[in-house]
Image (tube, helix red, strand yellow):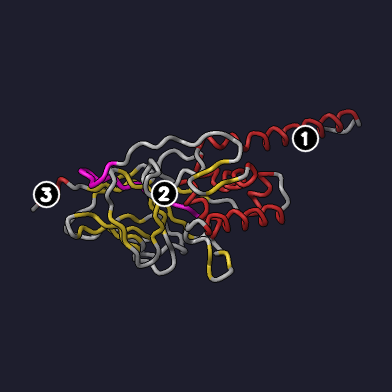
Amino acid sequence: MTEALDVRRVRIGFCGEWYDADPAAEFVIGREGDLAVDDNPYLHRRFLVLTWQQDMWWLVNAGTQLSATISDPAGALQAWLAPGGRVPLVFPDTTVLFTAGPTTYEIEIVCEDPTFTPSQLEPSSGIGATTIGPVTLTPSQKQLIVALAEPLLRREGTSISAIPSSKEAAARLGWELTRFNRKLDNVCDKFDRRGVRGLRGGPGQLASNRRARLVEHAVTARVVTADDLSLLDGVDAARSGIDRAGSARSTADGTPA
């Protein structure tokens, strides 16, 4: 039995550190446990649990408030793990994203001798209207997602990130907050209609943490990738042009630039 379990070794990576799960015991991830992620008061003490059952590893959400987004690096799998839910770990690499308060955490789970090996998917490209499966995004809608996901897209490896507030993301794009919120509502409605869970808090209401859920889905499903950061280049160029123009006017007026 031990030999069979050794074949299915599981390692958990977080911020450059690696942990081994023991098939004979649960591996607990949370504010406390085998992997103490952070002392964030919004994070459950006992949140995610890896357990060996039915000849495979399972990831269980033992929390009561928080959810997690599960994916493989190629984007072949994307699942929303709500409180009380469980998913089998069947791929060689699994990425887990979850948000507690203002902070988003990313964990990598590596399984030896996995049940499935996903095929490679071609990355999306282009800066025009983009179709990801059945969801079509306008350039400004994709810009909005990139602005919110920028900290995650710029990361290297697993990490801790802070998703921008609506006010910060609006300022990043040079938009009025009312415009940003209107577009955010439209984007969340669009994904919700296509079956992306966690974007609604109830009938007719968008979830209060929809920014975090939108970013988790967009990054893990490869709706946006690091290549799409170029969509923010025009914003930076326009801002630089305004700054140079302001500096030139100040110099012409004889005032300090």
Estimate how packed mark 3 is, as few (under 14), some (14 to 19) or many (20 or more) residues with alpha carbons within 10 Å: few
- Badge 3 marks a residue whose secondary structure is helix
> Disc 3 to disc 2, how far (Cα)?
29 Å
* Overall secondary structure of the magenta section: strand
How many circles with numbers are drawn on the protein?
3
Q: Residue at x 67, y 52 (%)?
A: 180
The three-letter amino acid code for the residue at tag 3 is Ala
Q: Is residue 47 above or below residue 168?
A: below
Q: Nearer the viewer, residue 128 or 257?
A: 128
**Residue 242 - label:** 1
Q: Residue at x 35, y 56 (%)?
A: 36
> Disc 1 to disc 2, how far (Cα)?
37 Å
Q: Nearer the viewer, residue 31 or 162?
A: 162
The three-letter amino acid code for the residue at tag 1 is Ile
Residue 105 located within the stretch drawn in magenta: yes
> Disc 1 to disc 3, how far (Cα)?
64 Å
Q: Residue 252 sits in which quadrant?
A: top right
Task: Write down the region rendered in magenta.
Answer: 103-117
Residue 119 located within the stretch drawn in magenta: no
Estimate how packed mark 2 is, as few (under 14), some (14 to 19) or many (20 or more) residues with alpha carbons within 10 Å: many
- Badge 1 marks a residue whose secondary structure is helix
The three-letter amino acid code for the residue at tag 2 is Glu
Rendering coords of residue 243 (x, y %): 76, 34
Q: Quadrant of the C terminus?
A: top right
Which residue is tagged 3?
4
Q: Is residue 197 left or right of residue 5?
A: right
Which residue is tagged 2?
106
Q: Residue furthest front?
A: 134
Q: Earlier in the sequence, mark 3 or mark 2?
A: 3
- Badge 2 marks a residue whose secondary structure is strand
Estimate how packed mark 1 is, as few (under 14), some (14 to 19) or many (20 or more) residues with alpha carbons within 10 Å: few
Rendering coords of residue 25 (x, y %): 20, 60
